[in-house]
Amino acid sequence: MRAAARRAWGAAGVALGACALLYWLAAGRAAGYGVSALWVWAAAGAVLLAVGAADLVIAARPIRTAAAVTAALRAAILLAAAVFLTVECFVARGMNARCETDADVLLVAGAMVYGETPSSALTARLDCAADYLRAHPSARAVLCGGQGPGEAISEAEAMRRYLTAAGIGEARLLLEDRSATTAENMRFAYALLNDPSARVCVVTSNFHVCRTRLLAAACGWKDVEAIAAPFSGVMLPHYMAREFLTLLVDHWRGNW
């Protein structure tokens, strides 16, 4: 590779690495550095910075062995980026999902509850569910989510309280209050309903639609639709990127 091209690759690597590290700092400051998988941004930034800096050094003083190593690392990074961006296209496609049919059942995916209060992400999902249930009085909802750390009640119970306060009849709500993951949300809801012919629509945050639909379909439901609850802010890029990792983990575990 010519020195000019190597310098260009090096500069791009350094710039992208710096951006990843800056995002890690901003996201950590906004939501805490303990957020699941946030460390990936720091790791990616460090790798990109290291490879980019090495290219800049080699462009100034060529070292054959080092050049071969950085070329191999660059090829691996580009391949990983291509796979990642392909998956992210599917994640992005689901972010404006709106249920176009008359669903029999809504599957409302769980999210964090602070004590007994639904988080903003869960509140957005519940508002979407309430709107749909008002517009479709024959539809029911399965409220999914067990009780996790920092939660005084199950996520399903918090959702039941929110929806009944919003005027949704309790008889229309089924509680699935044992699950701890999205895969369990869908699997336990399937067992609870015991109706593979039901027309279902998942309700979840916009970045989460693609994976949730896959998991619901893997349970046995056909033509799963979705309602994407709005989510925005500094954490959205992270949660979109995290879906790539969780899709891989779910596939490895045989969840879809």
Image (cartoon, helix red, strand yellow):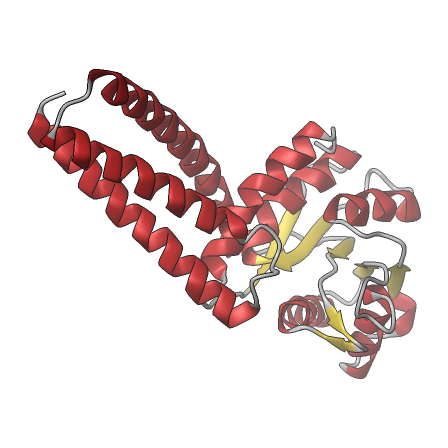
The quadrant of the rendering that contains the C terminus is top right
Q: Please say if 168 is above or below 75.
A: below
Taking depth in this image into account, of 251 and 169 the one nearest to the observer is: 251
Query: What is the x, y in percent for residue 165?
Result: 80, 83
Query: What is the x, y in percent for residue 37?
Result: 58, 50
Q: Is residue 178 visible?
A: yes
Residue drawn at the location 75% of the way across and 70% of the way down: 113
Residue drawn at the location 51% of the way across and 65% of the way down: 28
Res. 148 image quadrant = bottom right
Query: What is the x, y in percent for residue 221?
Result: 76, 38
Q: Please say if 125 is above or below 249.
A: below
Q: Please say if 117 is above or below 107.
A: below
Q: Please say if 216 is above or below 256.
A: below
Residue drawn at the location 37% of the way across and 52% of the way down: 20
Taking depth in this image into account, of 65 and 46 the one nearest to the observer is: 65
Res. 38 image quadrant = bottom right
The total of numbered circles placed on residues is 0
Residue 95 falls left or right of residue 102: left
Residue drawn at the location 18% of the way across and 34% of the way down: 57
Taking depth in this image into account, of 231 and 55 the one nearest to the observer is: 55
Query: What is the x, y in percent for residue 225?
Result: 64, 47
Residue 7 falls left or right of residue 74: left
Taking depth in this image into account, of 168 and 230 the one nearest to the observer is: 230
The quadrant of the rendering that contains the N terminus is top left
Q: Is residue 100 visible?
A: no
Residue 36 falls left or right of residue 21: right
